[in-house]
Image (spheres, rainbow, N blue to C red):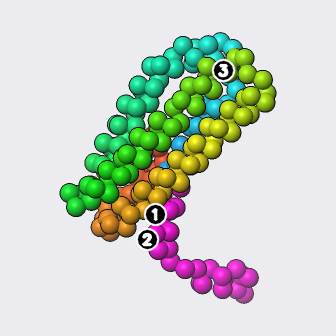
Amino acid sequence: MHSPTAPYLSEQRQPTSANTARRAVRAMLAGSVAVSISVCMPVSSAAAAALASAAPASTQDSSQRVEKRIDDMHTKLHIVSSQETLWQTVAQTMRDNQQTLEPLVAERAKNAASATALQDLDSFAAVSEAHTGGIRRFIAAFEPLYTAMSDAQKKDADTLFRSGPGKAGKTK
């Protein structure tokens, strides 16, 4: 006897490269959302003080992490010279997103110990909105590059993004 879902399964469409790109980018950025949320969660007074005193150094560290991620992705995606202009748009978008998000995260950390519940929620909303905007800008920048990639590069990109931040390219 056939299950009621069997006809549905046979009618599933094959994913297009554009849909695959969107899913891959969303998967990678979903991990970034988790990191942003963990940064934005309420912290104890002692932790807030430590975060506030470390804020200037963290901006530099954050910029260095973004540059390392850009270099790592460039290598793992095997960007060729004909794709370099598209890649530079992606890289600059990553830098711009970091520069937009960093001051909001630093301000949130600075005020964590004294913020009211409403201020805390407002700060969380500001960081979340900046992050969502950054994801949208990243997708817009990455899609033309993904479209211009060879099938092998797309496969590498799918694996890289599916793995999520911190696990880039690692398979089980």
Q: Secondary structure at mark 2?
A: helix
Residue 170 percent across, percent down from the top left: 40, 47
Verify CB contact (< 8 Å) between mark 3 and mark 2: no
User: Which element is circle 3 on?
Assistant: helix
Q: Position of residue 67 (x, y in %)?
A: 35, 37
Q: Tell me if I can see residue 1 in this picture.
A: yes
Q: Three-letter amino acid code at disc 1?
A: Ala
Please name the residue shown 74% across and 82% down the image. 4
Q: State whether residue 27 appears in this view.
A: no
CA separation in Å, label 3 and label 1: 38 Å
- Residue ID at (72%, 87%): 1
Magenta span: 1-27
Marks 2 & 1, CB-CB < 8 Å contact: yes
The residue under the point 58% across, 31% down is 104
Residue 12 percent location from the top left of the image: 58, 80
Up-down relation of residue 99 to residue 131 (above or below): above
Circle 2 is placed at which residue position? 17
Q: Compare marks 3 and 2 and give the one earlier in the sequence.
A: 2
Give whichever of 134, 153 is nearer the camera.
134
Where on the picture, by quarter, is residue 9? bottom right
